[in-house]
Image (cartoon, coloured by chain):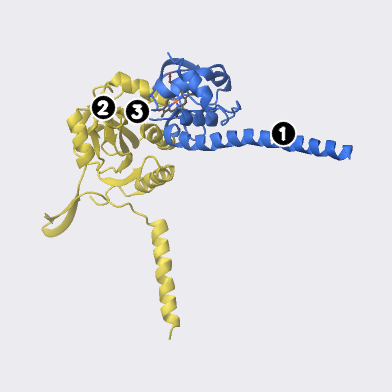
Chain colours: A yellow, B blue
Amino acid sequence: MKKPAYLFLGFICLCACKFNSSNKTLPIYGNRTAVTKMVNGQVVNDTTYATIPPFKFVDQYGDSTGSQNLAGKIYVADFFFTSCPSICPIMQRNMLAVYKAYKDTPDVKIVSFTIDPKYDTPPVLKNYAEKLGVTGNSWLFLQGNRDTVYRIAEKNFLVAVSKDSTAAGGYVHQGWFVLVDKQKRVRGSYDGTDPKQVAQLIDDIKTLKAEPAAAGK
Amino acid sequence: MKMKVICSICALLVILIISCQSSDSLEFNRYYAEGSVVYQTHCQNCHGQHGEGLNGLIPPLTDSVFLRKNSDQLPCAVMFGLKGKITIGKRLFEGQMPPASGLANIEIAQALTYITNSFGNKMGIFNVEMVNGDLVKCR
């Protein structure tokens, strides 16, 4: 009587384990809307996900860089400023691990947005990148319009930043590393001050790279 | 009888010496232990868990020669910050260390005892009297 039940349970467990290890997919963050559209004369229900809106800033080389340079790429975004005395050194130390893992992979990039664009001009950012040991185009340091950067940080990347004269360095911000997929959707958010979560991020990029290009589109 | 007295005096002396020594090392151990906590909360984000620094941005704390040579400047650097060019381990750094706001002299002494006896350094205790003395000479 009881045997089949156990077997069944065991089977479920096995499935669950297997599902976890081989078919892992990352969640998709942000608001989603259901759309009904006509495809070949048939009504199809589809879901559209929140995406990072277009932006155009200047990188550490003084070149105009923005969403069009990141189209079709997986990237990790964070928000920082070069004179940050608190968590930024920890974040960038951990981001270096991501950089080392993917610097020779053309479709994976890192984008650090400065939240102090007044001080962090392209030459300041370039100097910072060089001292950090970063060369080439796989890790971009972007200076943008302050209000635009703050808006996309909070609204699209879901990272809180603000100016606060009482905080060390003059700004408060969160140390999230945000993972964005090739369709510009947020697929993960990791505590950039925690090496364990950053190791998870490095792993999750692999999962994302293996995802079929058209998935969810 | 005489022998006994000499023996007990000797024994007393030995005990005294041992206890003096251990109270010295006890003081060192306290400074070092508390210093590791001060380091974790106020310095480690920049200088790293193993004093390794951060590439060309933040210097490591492993240059024993620099630390020994500039030991009387260290309290001022921690208390009031440090900026400009310095050479650490044959590499040039030009960064800025912010003042450690809110640290008491004793905490500076503990942190300095910790860093000057970790990461391959071995300079012995950096006590609060030394810190007090150095701080009045800051430029």
Can you give x and y, in whole percent of width and height, for residue A38 in the image? 11, 55
Tell me the kind of residue under disc 2.
Asp
Mark 2 or mark 3: which is in front? 2
Mark 3 sits on what residue? A137
Question: Nearest the camera: B75 or A151?
Answer: B75
Can you give x and y, in whole percent of width and height, for residue A41 in the image? 10, 58
Say above or below: B47 vs B77: below
Establish whether labels 2 and 1 are both on one chain.
Answer: no
Residue B106 appears left or right of A212: right
Q: Residues within 10 Å of mark 2 (few under 14, many from 20)?
A: many
- Tell me which chain the residue with mark 2 is part of: A
> Does the residue at mark 2 contact the one at mark 3 (Cβ under 8 Å)?
no
Can you give x and y, in whole percent of width and height, for residue A115 in the image? 26, 30
Residue A211 appears left or right of B67: left
Mark 2 sits on what residue? A116
Which quadrant holds residue A35? bottom left
